[in-house]
Amino acid sequence: MTLSRIKTRYDAVIVGSGHNGLVAAAYLAKAGLSVLVLERNDCLGGATVSQQLFPDYDASLSRYAYLVSLLPPSIVDELGLKFETRQRRTASFTPYIDGCGTNRGLVISNVDENRSRESMREMTGSDTAWNRYKRLLALESAIARVAWPSLLQPLQSRESFRSRLKTADERAAWHAFVERPIGEVIEQLAEHDVLRGLLLTDAKIGVFTQPHDASLLQNRCFLYHVIGNETGEWRVPVGGMKSLVDALTNRGLELGVTFLTSTPATHVECGPVHHTVSYTVEGVQHTVDAVRVLVNAGPRTFARLLGESWNPIPTDEGSVVKMNMLLHRLPQVKAFGVTPEEAFSGSFHIDESYQQLQTSWQQASRSELPDPAPAEMYCHTLTDNSILSPELRLKGYHTLTLFGLDMPYRLFKDDNDARRTEVKQRYLAGLERICAESFADCLARDRSGKPCIEVKTPVDLEREVDLDQGNIFHNTLSWFFTDNPEVIGQWGVETHHPRIYRAGSSALRGGAVSGIPGRNAAMCVLAKKDRG
């Protein structure tokens, strides 16, 4: 779109083209509003972008995001998106060494409950652990049935939710996941150190916390990982995250949305009838009037646009390292009786026992890089190889996506480059320990001989996709209800500025690849429009 075709005024200007901004744009345009989307980078998608990271290989990797659990099918249906996800055969694989010194692995299957039960019996010696694990899953299902449907509705109070708890499981789940630190129920229902660590992982990905954190940040993170679509299953986007971005962009274009890339917004001047949004193109400033402004960016960018101060709190700090890899073949694992396909297709846990996670949190709290460095990863291409060229598929190439835990922003802010290199070596060392052959030998290499590995630290995430302090959730995760009586009945996207909305992860009930805050922002706008 050339600037000569840009209107001087739009019903809505959306700052940021992450998937939430694209969702909001499509809903508003579908309702007949004129919509302009401003994106500072040279491509649409924000943190959900897919790119050819290694120029010598035709492989499109989801650079910052990975799996999908929280995207409601209703958004796909309401917008008529051409988007598909697939189930992973393996939910998770966790290597460990048994009492006899044999390398084994705990396998949780998505398709074969007997495989999961037998694997847990092998680890613990009886079915008691499996029965207690099933009890925890029942509690997760109970809280999901209450929380999940509410995410696409106006905010309710804590008391309103509590009054709706009818069954014993719902009340027990509320106590375990909302009122008490998540560490208590994990320690109660999981005795084995490896199983405890596996469960705790969902409470720590992306945030810096521990099982008995008094803030209960770990509980909120856990809930975001287990309530999606009332099942908590993490599914693989066919075609990678690019497929979601493309589906939303194409639908937006069909509905008349205007997109501008390489166009950072610089200021929003509030007005009584319309706001004026300033943006730059090749260093030249331009303005456009907007009846409404939706900001799909972090709190710091929001504050900068409105000329306000940004005052983060400790729990706003991000804690994740993302490492993308291309392999010319999958390595064998040491775990007895586990194939590479079974191990790598699910969430593959590295150095994530309960004790190891406690140690890594303590080390990072002392501003030390955890050693060993806990992480989880999965192989997208075992479930969906469409992100590879036909040639790479035939040759047996695969991608690996790794997310590191207990890697807070503070560890990287002073010497990012050196720390990036150091943490990469620790992840590779962990992979070497659990593979039955050299992991390094399985990595693809570019024409110069360099391994195909890309590492993104919290500082990189902040610089490249505007994730404040590297927080993949933008800021502190919120509950699915509110304790603030002033926002009961609101959508969680409203701000103190009339007709200016948060349309991204920093909205209440934002975070993760969900599209929920984007849809909620659109619903809020349309509800106010209908009321005049």
Image (tube, helix red, strand yellow):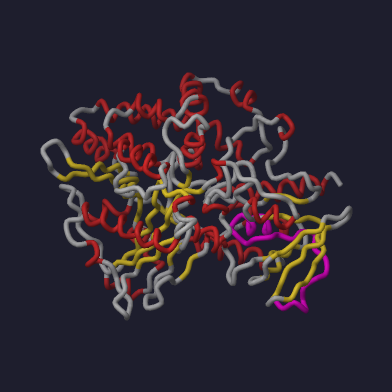
Q: Would you identify the image quadrant in which residue 126 lies?
A: top left
Q: Is residue 531 above or below residue 85?
A: above
Relative vertical location of residue 528 with respect to residue 427 in this rendering, above or below: above
Q: Is residue 313 magenta?
A: no
Report the number of numbered marks: 0
Q: Is residue 489 left or right of residue 189?
A: right
Of residues 410 and 357, the one nearer the viewer is 410
At which x and y percent is residue 380? 37, 59
Q: Does the magenta segment cover residue 2? A: yes
Could you say where residue 266 lies in the image, as x and y percent from the top left? Answer: 72, 64
Taking the spot 36% from the left edge, 66% from the top edge, the residue there is 453
* Residue visible at 47% across and 22% down in the picture: 172
Q: Nearer the viewer, residue 274 or 115?
A: 274
Q: Tell me residue 228's x, y (percent).
A: 50, 42
Residue 254 seen in render: no
Residue in view at x 68 percent, y 77 percent: 282
* Residue 497 seen in the current view: yes
Q: Dividing the image into 4 quarters, which one contains the N terminus?
A: bottom right
Q: Nearer the viewer, residue 346 or 264?
A: 264
Residue drawn at the location 28% of the way across and 37% of the way down: 194
Query: Which span of residues is magenta-colored?
Result: 1-26
Q: Residue furthest left?
A: 100
